[in-house]
Image: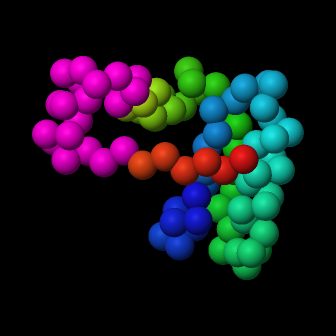
Amino acid sequence: MAHACTTAVSRVVFERDDANLDRDRRTASRILKPIPESQRPTFVHLRAHEEPLLWIPDLVVGAWSKPTTWRRALEERGICVEVHTLA
């Protein structure tokens, strides 16, 4: 997320999981704290059906997590998968 903040992102969308709302808020607060308030993106929780772009990470992770033809297809297309643990 720090990279997103340096590229003038105005909104970050978290996939809503009621069991993780408090943790998501604490994580976002900790990450955004060093950024000047006027430059901070807002963050919202939406369900996958409310923001279809949330499906993309699930598709990529599903393909990447198993060394199959899907993973090779991602690599051949130059799709770089990088995971950052925020918790």
**Residue at 40% across, 27% down:** 65
Query: Which quadrant would residue 22 be assigned to in this image?
Result: top right
**Residue 66: percent from left, percent from top:** 35, 22
Q: Residue furthest front?
A: 67
Residue 66 or residue 21, whichever sits in front: 66
Q: Is residue 25 left or right of residue 61?
A: right
From where the camera sits, is residue 10 visible? no
Residue 85 or residue 29, whichever sits in front: 85
**Residue at 19% across, 21% down:** 69
Q: Is residue 79 left or right of residue 10?
A: left
**Residue 40: percent from left, percent from top:** 68, 68
**Residue 43: percent from left, percent from top:** 69, 50
Residue 3 position (above or below residue 70): below
**Residue 47: percent from left, percent from top:** 64, 25
**Residue at 83% across, 50% down:** 26
Residue 78 or residue 7, whichever sits in front: 78
Q: Is residue 39 left or right of residue 74?
A: right
Residue 35 position (above or below residue 65): below
Residue 18 position (above or below residue 44): above
Q: Please state the extent of the stretch shown in magenta in the rendering.
A: 62-81
**Residue at 58% across, 58% down:** 1
